[in-house]
Image (spheres, helix red, strand yellow):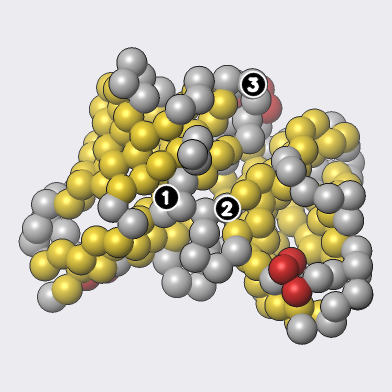
């Protein structure tokens, strides 16, 4: 049973560029949440996707957008990258029907913006 | 003031010591999570609890809903327990998690 997978593992981009990060949820899960973790800090909620729609959103600008596909996998897109976007991006999946939404985390994508 | 606060921020212990990490929160929650993060970033879920106490091996997690407080205990600590331990709450409004800043635990042999 595959857990949550993310790609790529590491990524280096230049200011102003655009980036797409990918997440495949744990088998059987239908909800994907994205978090940003800056160095030395706890993760911050970006948004959550369920049934191919953004269900909740944290305090992130519109430069951060996402998508969920019919197979429940998800993408996180960041436009016009800033140096401050350098962080570990974590994806977590859960099953909406469980109620308490136990979340399983992927290994993360480390984005460096230069 | 953060919605989720952990203490201590850093903790150094000798192998074999009993360790306690505390978490206080200020919002209504449906569940509280304890997570472990090793260098390199991967996060592992240790516990999800909404009341009482859970035990898994040498790890014990407790929660007091009335006091909005949870503790993570590690008995007979070992150097392999060295990691960042993060408390996160799941609010009643949905499944998003709000995280504490984490506690960096170092267990020396």
In space, the residues marked 3 and 2 are separated at their CA atoms by 19 Å
Closer to the chain start, of discs 3 and 1, is 1
* Number of numbered markers: 3
Disc 3 versus disc 1: distance between alpha carbons? Answer: 21 Å
Is A3 situated above or below A30? below
The chain holding disc 1 is B
Q: Is residue B4 left or right of residue A11?
A: left
Alpha carbon distance from label 2 to label 1: 9 Å
The residue identified by callout 3 is B93
Q: Secondary structure at mark 1?
A: strand
Which residue shows up at 80% across the image and 43% down it? A72
* Res A81 quadrant in image: bottom right
Residue A86 is tagged as: none
The subunit letter for the residue under badge 2 reads: A
CB contact under 8 Å: marks 2 and 1: yes
- x%, y% of residue A46? 72, 47
Measuring from the top left, give residue A10's x and y in whole percent: 69, 77
Q: Residue at x 40, y 23 (%)?
A: B50
Q: Label 2, on which residue?
A: A43
Q: Does label 1 lie on the same chain as label 2?
A: no
> In the displayed structure, would residue A21 be above or below residue B5?
below
| Residue found farthest to the left | B16
Q: Is residue A41 above or below residue A18?
A: above
* Mark 2 surroundings: few (<14), some (14-19) or many (≥20) residues within 10 A: many
């Amino acid at each position: 049973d595959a857990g949550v997978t993310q790609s790529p593992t590491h990524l280096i981009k230049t200011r102003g560029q655009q980036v797409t990060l990918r997440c495949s949820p744990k088998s059987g899960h239908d909800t994907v949440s994205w978090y940003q973790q800056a160095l030395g800090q706890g993760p911050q909620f970006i948004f959550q996707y369920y049934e191919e729609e953004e269900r909740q959103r944290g305090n992130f600008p519109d430069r951060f957008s996402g998508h969920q596909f019919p197979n429940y996998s998800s993408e996180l897109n960041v436009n016009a990258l800033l140096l401050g976007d350098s962080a570990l991006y974590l994806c977590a999946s859960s099953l909406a029907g469980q109620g308490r939404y136990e979340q399983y985390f992927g290994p993360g994508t480390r984005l460096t913006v230069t | 003031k953060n919605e989720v606060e952990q203490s201590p921020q850093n903790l150094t212990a000798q192998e074999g010591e009993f360790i306690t990490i505390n978490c206080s929160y200020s919002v209504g929650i449906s569940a509280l999570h304890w997570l472990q993060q090793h260098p390199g970033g991967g996060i592992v879920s240790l516990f999800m609890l909404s009341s009482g106490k859970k035990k898994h091996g040498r790890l014990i997690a407790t929660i007091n809903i009335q006091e909005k407080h949870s503790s993570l205990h590690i008995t007979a600590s070992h150097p392999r327990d060295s990691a960042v331990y993060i408390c996160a709450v799941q609010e009643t409004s949905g499944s998003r998690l709000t995280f504490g800043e984490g506690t960096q635990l170092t267990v020396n042999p």
